[in-house]
Image (cartoon, coloured by chain):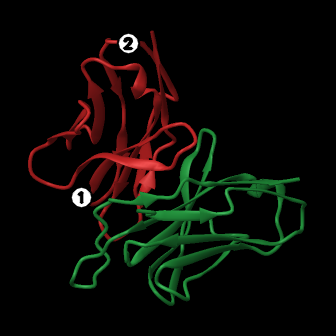
Chain colours: A red, B green
Amino acid sequence: AQSVTQLDSQVPVFEEAPVELRCNYSSSVSVYLFWYVQYPNQGLQLLLKYLSGSTLVESINGFEAEFNKSQTSFHLRKPSVHISDTAEYFCAVTPGRRALTFGSGTRLQVQP
Amino acid sequence: NAGVTQTPKFRVLKTGQSMTLLCAQDMNHEYMYWYRQDPGMGLRLIHYSVGEGTTAKGEVPDGYNVSRLKKQNFLLGLESAAPSQTSVYFCASSDHRPSGRFINTGELFFGEGSRLTVL
């Protein structure tokens, strides 16, 4: 079975500062990796995903994540955050033939 | 452009009462899921379905039942509600590969959630 660890439950950061949200996973087989974002009082939305190919993947709103197989990590980064990025971010993993397993989430709090 | 719709959005139950949460999707997706979200625990899979008439247990199925009589609907039932089932419930759906094999590329489409409180 696979598992996902998001070590930081909350990450406070000032507007326009860089941020990194950490995600580590464990699995005995190859996996697909995802980041989902949940804005207040909404469902989750897919932010970006790694299925194969380039290990660096990007979203349309400036986030990027890099798949590191040796470190079993898929950290999410953004060079300059905005107030509107305040949300909860979930890392998720699947070996493909199972439903997604989600991490416990990281609440990003962007302060002016 | 409804996507995934959950009803009801809020409900308060007394211990021992029963209820059903309805999830409807209009994207013709084969796969549907019920997750529960609890503080500090992320989302945990309750049950899922890979097609009409089929269901399977997820990570935390105890105390819940599901049915998928129509492709577009996935019902989650609580036969005898307990305070431990106080949570926010999310339904999601996803597409499938033409081969019919369950290959999950992870593009889940979520509803807005149903907040259930059991007193």
Where is residue A79? Give x, y as percent: 24, 19
- Residue at the left extreme? A53
Which residue type does callout 1 highlight? Ser
Q: Residue at 43% of width from left, 63% of height from top? A: B3
Where is residue B115? Give x, y as percent: 69, 52
Q: Residue at 47% of width from left, 27% of height from top? A: A8
In-image side of B103 versus B78 (left or right): left
| Residue that mark 2 sits on | A15
Q: Nearer the viewer, residue A23 or B110?
A: B110
In-image side of A2 versus A34 (left or right): right
Which residue type does callout 2 highlight? Glu
In-image side of B17 versus A4 (left or right): right
- Where disc 2 sits, the SS reads loop
Verify CB contact (< 8 Å) between mark 1 and mark 2: no
Of circles 1 and 2, the one toward us is 2
State which tag comes first along the sequence, 1 or 2. Answer: 2
Q: Quadrant of residue B16?
A: bottom right
| Residue that mark 1 sits on | A30
Q: Nearer the viewer, residue A29 or B53?
A: B53
Residue B40 badge: none
In the depicted structure, whether residue B100 falls above or below residue A24: below
Q: Are marks 1 and 2 on the same chain?
A: yes
Binning the other alpha carbons within 10 Å of mark 1 as few (below 14), some (14 to 19) or many (20 upward) gives few
- Where disc 1 sits, the SS reads loop
Where is residue A47? Give x, y as percent: 32, 43
Identify the chain of the residue marked 2, using the numbered disc in the image: A
Q: Residue at 42% of width from left, 14% of height from top? A: A13
In-image side of B83 versus B67 (left or right): right
